[in-house]
Structure formats: C-alpha cells, structure tokens
Image (cartoon, rainbow, N blue to C red):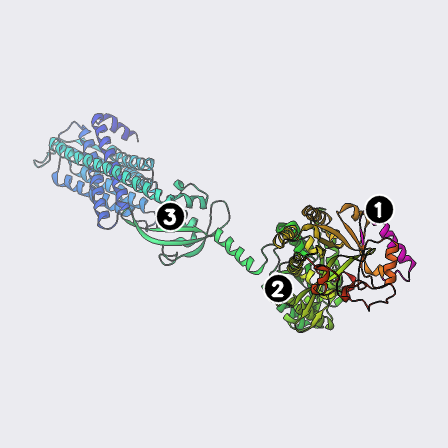
C-alpha cells in the first residue's frame, strides 16, 4: 500500500489527477442515471439506453485512465501504441455495457452485484490493455500482489456501486452509487499504477507509430467532452422526466383521491402509486406506499391472480394494525409511464356486509323486539314437530298477547306501546332456556315453543311469565303490562302446525273471556265456542252497513207526577241469519274488538238526530262504553255530533259506569270535565254494583245517580236491600244529585220509591223499550200509547225481565 501512496504522491501531477477524478465522477453519474433510465424502459428503447450508458461509462473509465497516465511523469521518453489504445477503449465500452445489461436483469439472482463485477473486470481489462499500449524507454516490472489487489478492488467496488444505485429510489442512493463507481475506477487505477515499476533502458527505442502525449490529450479531450455532453443530457433527461412524472403523479393522485374506493397502480407486485382511500384502508400514508409489495396487503391481488380484468373478486385486505377487512377487487391492465401496469380498485365491503347481515337478520327476526318473526317461528316449529315425533316427546305452543294493548297506544302513544312490547320480549326471553323459542307474530301477538315431557311444564312456564309481567310494569304514569296465555300440546291436541297454532289461539281467547291475566289449556269444546265468537265479531263489524242495527227507547218518568222526563237509548241487533242477539252477548265482543267505537258513534249520531226533531224537548240518555271514554277523540266526536244534528247539549245525558273510571282515572276525569264544558249532563250508571266508591261522586262531575235494577227488584222481600236503596237516596239528597231507579216493574216498587222521595224511575212499569214511533204522543205532545202508560200499584209484574229492563243493555256511544 505504501508503494501505491508513494506512486500517487511522487510520480503524478496532482492537478491532472484531480481532473481525472472529475471526469471519472461525471462519467459515473452519467452511467448511473442512464442505467436507471434503461431499467425503466422496455424493448429497443432499453437497449438504446444501455448502449448510451455503456459509451458514457466506458469512455469515462478510459478517459480517467489516460488523464491519469498523462499525469504520470516517469522522466523517460514514452508514447502510446495506437491500436492497443483504441482496443482499450473498446474493452471499456463493451465490458461496461455487458455489466450494465446484466445488472438490470431482475430475474438473475444478485444481478446488480454480478453486473458490477463484470464492470470491474472491464475496468481492469481497459487498464492493463492501456498499460500494454504504453511505450517507454525501459522495462515494466509488475508486482503480482498489487495487480491482484487492483482487480479485487475494481470488482468489489463495481458490484457495490450498481447494487446501491439500483436498489434505492432516492437521489442519495444514486449519488452513493456514482461515488462507489468513482472509487472502483480510481482505486483500481492507482493500485495498478503502484504495481508497476519502470526500469529505464535507453537501448529500448520508442516506435515511430507511437501516439505522442499531445495527440492523446486531444483524444482524451474529445472523450471527456462526450462524457460531459452525455452527462448533461442524462441530467436534463432526468429533470424532465422527474417533472413529467411529478405532474403525472399529481394529476393521477388528484383524480385517485377524489375516488371513495381505494385505487392502486402497481407494476407486477410493486406498488407505484396509491390514493388516500387505500392508505386509510391499510393504515399508512399514501405517500409511504410506493415501493411496497401489494401482496403485503392483498395476497390475492398479484398480477394475473386477481381474476379476469374488470370482473369483481372478493378478497381480504390485511392492514398494518387491525384484522382482515373484506374487500372487492377489480383489476385492469393500464399503461403508466409508457410501461404496462395494473390498476387495482379496492372497495371496502364492511358496510355492505353489515347491511347484508341486517337484511338477513330482519328476514328472520322482528325489527322492534329482536325476536324471531312468524316465518322463522314456523320453520322452527316444523323442525320441533319432526323432532318430537322422532323422540316421542311433547311440544307445547303458547300464544299470548297483551290485554287492552290498543288502549295503551291510544292513551300513551305508539312509542309507549313499542316500549311495552320490548319490555315483554325481554322479560319473557329471560325465562326461556336454549331449547325454547319466543317469536313475535305481529302487533302484540307472541308465541313460544316449549319442548317438554309433561303438560305441567308448559303451565309452570305460563305462570312464571304472568308473574314476571305483573312485576315488570312501567312507572306509575305509564302503562301496566297485562297478558293472557293460551296453550296447545302436540300430539295431545293436534299434530299439524296450523292446527296447533289455531288451538293455542283458541285457548288464548278462552283466557281472555274468563277475566284476562291468566292462562288456559286448549279443550275441544273451546274450538266451537271461539269460532262462533269470531264469526259474531266479524258480522258485528258489518252490522251497521247491513242495516241490522236499530235503536229503541225506554221512557224515564218523574215518580211524583208520572210525567215523562226523557228517554234512555238502547241498541238492538237483528242478525240476518241468527235473529235477535242479546246486547249482553255482543256488547262485550264489540268492546274487546274495538268495534264499539264505530257502533257507539253511530248510536249517538242517530239518537241525537232523532231527538233534535222532537217538538217536546225531552232529555236523551245515551250509555257510553269505557273504551269510548278513554278514546283520544271522544269529546271532539260528541261536539261534532251535537253541532251537525243541532241538538241542544243540555238535553243530552251521558251515562257511564265506574269501570271506565277504574281503568284510567286521570284520563276519565279529564274527558268528563270536557264533556261538562260542552253543557252535557253526566250520570253514574248502575250505582251500587261493581267498583262503586263514594270518592268517585266527589271526584267526578256527575249530575245524576242511577240505582241498578237488581236492588229495586229486591226491595219487596229484603230489608237489607231497602236499607241500601234508602242510603243511596239519602246520599243523593245530601250531595244535591237526583237519583233515578232502574228496573221498576211493580206498583209496590214504585210506591216504595215515592215514599223514599226518589226523583225518577225507569222500567217496564212505565214502558217497555220500543221504537220511538211508539212514543210519538210524548215526543210530539199529549200522552203515549198503552205501551208507554205507567201501571198502577195494583198491577203485578209485567213479565220476566230481559236484558232491556236492566237499563244496561245498550252500547250507546
């Protein structure tokens, strides 16, 4: 190594050495830049760029050598053989081109290192050929160790130069590659120069054809000029290409970032560009993605493996941090930078999968409660029936619905009704195990499947459900949960799904008709009863339209004078096929089904229209159901009827039982006060029965008390009944409320009422219920016909009382 340093310091012109280094550096930069251009090109264009790079690199190596040789001052005559000098230039260009060509072949393992090794060999071939062309008056003696070292340095640094230059994309990598190429050339040259020793010998002549140093200087100048031109061209080309690429990338990125879907442009498996949407999907900045492998995130998206072009393929995206993301890929070949690439559109499927999951859930479940729906319930029931048949076990079907759920919606709103349904679903499902299933069939109808060994298990579950719902009501101001349950068993009651559900529904109707808030098992005779009830309910809804409903009137008279004071309106149903149907039968059905609202409005409208045409302004008493009183628009409807018929409000008396007051006291009180504000009178009907409470007389704005006919019919033979009637009459006098006695059928009953100072009476003794035409003399002046004439005290009962005599047989609105 000392000989190299000594040779470098003592035998060279340092100014020319610096020039050689400058030329070498320029040629290295030009060679690296041109090689990178060639690696990005294809076909003939790549071959052209490789040739240009070989000329620039080879010429630079050759010029570096001979400028350094000019800087070498051996103090003896010297020259250069023309042929070998030209051959050294050819070696430099050809071997440099071979090394560069090998370095850009990515299919060859360690191609840049091997190509750099070939280039280092080219440096050595050029150098030692150039030394062979060197003629000097003396002998050249070589140090084999330094010769080997020069070869090793050239190959080592040459391989490192191309590896570094081609592995990085930044300017720093290219600069490092060019610097290593400079080190490869210079280290080889000066090591090789240190390996030679010149022994002067004047006897050795210089050939006449030897090229003088000055002519060599001209050639070197031309070569250096070519290198400078090529370097400048490569630099200008690089700047232009960078600008074009930057503009193209900017335009592409602007368009790509405007897309909601992820977009990636890749060459093979290498990402060239990606938009922000794809960056968000993988959890990295879009600017950090170029240069990464696409298969790192999308193993299925390698070129040629992502399905046919323009055809969507579902795959999984693997981001940096989170778990796999379902995506849809669409791949399309594109030309990007004059080279074939693949554009990959990546669509996030999480939203679609979530929506599909919701659709799938809604297809089998109820949206409000989350329970199984009717279709899912039927599928499960079919499965359980097959399983029960195979195992010999029983299967219970429980049908339940909420008692008076329509009233909850009317009084508290549909939001409260929905909350109530959810509460029921949660309370009941908490009692079920994995073998049981609850479903919402629609509205407030629910069904439960219970595989069991004995029927008692189904009954026990029904008791638990009733108990849980009784204790699971809402706050004091909200609705209270109440339900009824019907149970049918397989195979005891039925073996088919439809029949089993129908029987459970039949048992549910039985539970409702027996007081609600309970459960019943199906019995064979229930089917006939419930079927008849449903047919009656169906016909009841069409009775008014068919003209089957009509009104009858029963007079109310003054006990002291016997004069008629008014009429109570009673409703009759003459069925086209069944004949007359008792109000005691159809009124409860109308109340449970909600048909009472339509029927009650018709009764009120017809009665008011009729009474408005009487010359004699008698009072009109109309019974009102609790369902009507609690309906939200009842007061508005009454006001509308009075306005349209022209009946004076003071002539209309609304009769209401205490049942309506018990269900919702606050709502009933508000409704009655609004009716009073219209000018109507309000009577408490059937006082003394049911939930009679003295506090109601003080709380609600009643104008009259009606004693139930069951008390009047017993006054002749029961002192206790007489005492009760006397108490009610005294209570009425004390409160300033007139009292009307219903069901008066004998003169003895009438005398008792007169003796006890009862104000008014109603019953068969004063007149049976009849069409209004029978009372024309009362309504239009004079006396009524015999049907309306009061009977004397000596007369016996007019006959056995029917539903009309009780005064509580009407469904007046």
Closer to the eye: label 2 or 3: 2
Q: Which residue is mark 3?
A: 264
Judging from the image, what secondary structure is the residue with disc 2 in? helix
Residue 10 or 326: which is nearer the viewer?
326
In the picture provided, is 226 more to the left or to the right than 265?
A: left
| Residue mark closest to the camera, 1 vs 3 | 1
Of the numbered discs in the image, which one, if any, rests on residue 734? 1
Q: Considering the numbered disc 3 on the image, is that residue within a helix, a strand or a loop?
A: strand
- Could you say where residue 173 lies in the image, as x and y percent from the top left? 33, 37
* Residue named by callout 2: 377
In the displayed structure, 294 sits above or below 7; it is: below
- Gap in Å between the C-alphas at discs 1 and 2? 62 Å
Which residue is pictured at 39% across the width and 51% down the height? 345
Q: What span is colored magenta in the figure?
A: 713-739
Q: Quadrant of the C terminus?
A: bottom right
**Relative to residue 232, is residue 286 drawn left or right?**
right
Quarter of the picture containing the N terminus is top left
Disc number lying in front (1 or 2):
1
Find residue 394 and report its horizontal and vertical position in percent. Answer: 71, 69
Residue 488's spot in the image, x, y percent? 70, 68
Q: Residue furthest right?
A: 719
Q: Which residue occupies the foreground of this view, 177 or 780? A: 780
Mark 1 near mark 2, Cβ–Cβ under 8 Å? no
734 within the magenta span: yes
Along the viewing direction, whichever of 311 and 143 lies nearer the viewer: 311
Q: Main secondary structure of the magenta part?
A: helix
Q: Residue at x 28, y 49 (%)?
A: 339
């Amino acid at each position: 190594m000392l000989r190299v340093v000594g040779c470098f310091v003592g035998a060279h012109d340092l100014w020319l050495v610096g020039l050689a280094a400058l030329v070498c550096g320029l040629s290295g930069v030009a060679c690296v830049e041109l090689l990178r251009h060639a690696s990005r090109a294809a076909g003939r264009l790549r071959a052209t760029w490789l040739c240009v790079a070989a000329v620039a690199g080879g010429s630079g190596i050759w010029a570096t050598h001979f400028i350094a040789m000019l800087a070498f001052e051996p103090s003896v005559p010297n020259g250069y053989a023309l042929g070998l000098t030209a051959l050294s230039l050819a070696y430099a260009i050809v071997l440099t081109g071979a090394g560069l060509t090998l370095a850009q072949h990515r299919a060859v393992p360690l191609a840049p290192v091997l190509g750099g090794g070939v280039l280092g060999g080219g440096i050595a071939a050029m150098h030692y050929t150039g030394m062979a062309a060197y003629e000097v008056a003396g002998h050249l003696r070589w140090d084999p160790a330094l010769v080997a070292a020069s070869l090793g340095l050239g190959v080592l640094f040459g391989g490192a130069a191309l590896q570094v230059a081609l592995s990085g994309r930044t300017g720093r990598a290219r600069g490092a590659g060019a610097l290593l190429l400079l080190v490869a050339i210079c280290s080889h040259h000066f090591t090789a120069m240190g390996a030679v020793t010149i022994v002067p010998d004047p006897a050795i002549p210089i050939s006449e054809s030897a090229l003088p140093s000055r002519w060599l200087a001209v050639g070197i100048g031309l070569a250096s000029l070519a290198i400078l031109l090529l370097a400048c061209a490569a630099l200008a080309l690089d700047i232009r290409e960078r600008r074009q690429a930057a503009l193209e990338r900017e335009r592409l990125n602007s368009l790509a970032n405007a897309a909601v879907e992820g977009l990636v442009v890749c060459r093979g498996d290498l990402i060239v560009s990606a938009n922000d949407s794809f960056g968000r999907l993988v959890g990295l900045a879009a600017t950090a993605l170029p240069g990464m492998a696409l298969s790192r995130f999308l193993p299925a998206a390698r070129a040629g493996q992502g399905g046919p072009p323009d055809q969507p393929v579902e795959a999984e995206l693997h981001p940096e941090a989170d778990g796999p993301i379902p995506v849809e890929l669409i791949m399309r070949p594109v030309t990007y930078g004059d080279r074939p690439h693949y554009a990959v559109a990546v669509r996030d499927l999480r939203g679609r999968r979530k929506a599909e999951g919701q659709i799938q859930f809604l297809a089998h479940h109820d949206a409000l409660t989350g329970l199984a729906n009717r279709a899912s319930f039927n599928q499960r029931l079919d499965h359980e029936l097959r399983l029960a048949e195979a195992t010999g076990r029983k299967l219970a079907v429980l049908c339940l619905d909420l008692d008076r759920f329509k009233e909850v919606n009317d009084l508290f709103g549909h939001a409260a009704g929905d909350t109530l349904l959810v509460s029921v679903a949660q309370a009941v499902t908490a009692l079920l195990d994995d073998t049981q299933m609850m479903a919402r069939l629609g509205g407030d109808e629910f069904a439960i499947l219970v595989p069991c060994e004995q029927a008692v298990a189904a009954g026990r579950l029904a008791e638990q459900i009733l108990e849980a719902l009784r204790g699971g009501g809402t706050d004091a101001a909200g609705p209270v949960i109440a339900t009824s349950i019907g149970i049918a068993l397989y195979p005891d009651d039925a073996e088919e799904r439809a029949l089993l559900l129908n029987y459970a529904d039949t048992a549910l109707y039985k539970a409702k008709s027996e007081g609600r808030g309970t459960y019943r098992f199906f019995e064979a005779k229930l089917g006939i009863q419930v079927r008849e009830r449903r047919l009656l309910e169906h016909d009841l809804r069409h009775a008014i339209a068919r003209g089957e409903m009509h009104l009858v009137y029963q007079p109310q008279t003054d006990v002291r004078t016997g004069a008629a004071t008014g009429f109570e309106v009673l409703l009759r149903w003459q069925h086209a096929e069944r004949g007359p149907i008792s109000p005691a039968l159809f009124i409860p059905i109308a109340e449970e089904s909600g048909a009472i609202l339509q029927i009650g409005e018709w009764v009120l409208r017809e009665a008011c229209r009729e009474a408005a045409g009487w010359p004699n302004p008698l009072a009109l008493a109309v019974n009102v159901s609790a369902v009507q009183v609690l309906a939200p628009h009842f007061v508005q409807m009454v006001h509308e009827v009075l306005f349209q018929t022209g009946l004076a409000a003071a002539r209309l008396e609304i009769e209401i039982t205490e049942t309506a007051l018990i269900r919702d006291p606050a709502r009933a009180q508000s409704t009655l006060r609004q009716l009073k504000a219209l000018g109507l009178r309000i009577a408490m009907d059937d006082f003394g029965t049911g939930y009679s409470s003295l506090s109601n007389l003080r709380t609600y704005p009643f104008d009259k008390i009606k004693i139930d006919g069951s008390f009047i019919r017993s006054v002749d033979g029961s002192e206790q009944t007489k005492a009760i009637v006397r108490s009610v009459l005294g209570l009425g006098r004390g409160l300033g409320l007139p009292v009307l006695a219903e069901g008066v059928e004998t003169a003895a009953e009438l005398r008792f009422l007169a003796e006890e100072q009862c104000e008014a009476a109603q019953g068969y003794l004063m007149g049976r219920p009849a069409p209004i035409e029978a009372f024309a003399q009362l309504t239009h002046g004079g006396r009524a016909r015999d049907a309306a004439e009061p009977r004397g005290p000596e007369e016996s009962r007019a006959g056995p009382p029917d539903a009309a005599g009780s005064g509580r047989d009407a469904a007046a609105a």
